[in-house]
Amino acid sequence: MIEFEGVAHSYGARPVLHEVDLRLPERRVAFVGANGSGKSTLARMINGLVHPERGRVLVDGVDPARDGRAVRKRVGFVFTDPDSQIVMPTAGEDVAFSLRRQGLPKAERARRAAETLARHGLAGYEDHPAHQLSGGQKQLLALCSMLVLEPDVLVCDEPTTLLDLRNKRHFAEVLGGLRQQVVMVTHDLELLHDFDRVVVLDEGRVVADDVPAAALPRYRELIGV
């Protein structure tokens, strides 16, 4: 259960969130809104990348602002640009690097990395230079580096923005098959037809909150399409 209780936040003199109250028990939840609506800020509060100025966020009762380490063991985060998350020379090493703090032998880390890559469409890429992968493969690699930790929640901040149509579809299929609760920030409405819930934000406020068929028309109205 992810909860936002009276969450407000500003960047300097510019307010970006106003007293947001949400409870998110659903398996697939999306945040949508125009640029600057506060959706990415709200998503980043789930694992403590941003702390609210007022109110609080809870992940199964734990506040990321107070115990970020405990929350980040359960919440993985995938950014828009996978290059910002890739830190090791090869795909296998990059996924294994996520396990560095678990006290596992090197061989076990490598085995788990290879299994995770294979499970999500990158079988045989363990020794492939990570930064020479295609854009879609890099985003899958960033995803694998989170999934190898077996989080309960996966937050994705516009993960398909840099992908072509084929890779968008593949990435969406991978997300759809995950056991994790997925919270996704996106402008790509085609990805949301099978989501359980869509939260629409406008100027830092929730203006619609419903199943996709009911919430997305409000978003289209806001952006004039």
Image (cartoon, rainbow, N blue to C red):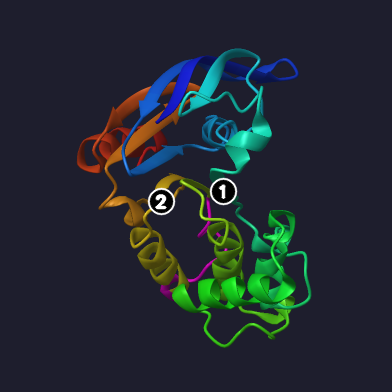
Q: Nearer the viewer, residue 215 or 97?
A: 97
Query: Could you tell me residue 198's position as x and y percent?
Result: 33, 38
Report the residue marked by disc 2.
180
In this rendering, position of residue 165 left or right of residue 196: right
- Range of residues picked out in magenta: 158-166
Residue 61: x %, y % from top left: 48, 23
Mark with earlier residue (2, 1):
1
* Residue 152 x/y as whole percent: 46, 46
Q: Is residue 23 above or below residue 169?
A: above
Q: Disc 2, disc 1: CB below 8 Å?
A: yes
In the orientation shown, which residue stands out farthest toward the left? Answer: 213
Q: CA gap, disc 2 to disc 1?
A: 10 Å
- Amino acid type for the residue under numbered disc 2: Gln
Check residue 208 for magenta coloring.
Answer: no
What residue type is disc 1 on?
A: Gly
* Residue identified by numbered label 1: 76
Q: Quadrant of the C terminus?
A: top left
Magenta stretch containing residue 161, yes or no?
yes
Closest to the observer, 19 or 109: 109
SS for dot 1: strand
Say which residue appears at 49% left-offset and 79% top-offset.
118
| Residue 114 can be seen in this image | yes
Closest to the observer, 48 or 199: 48
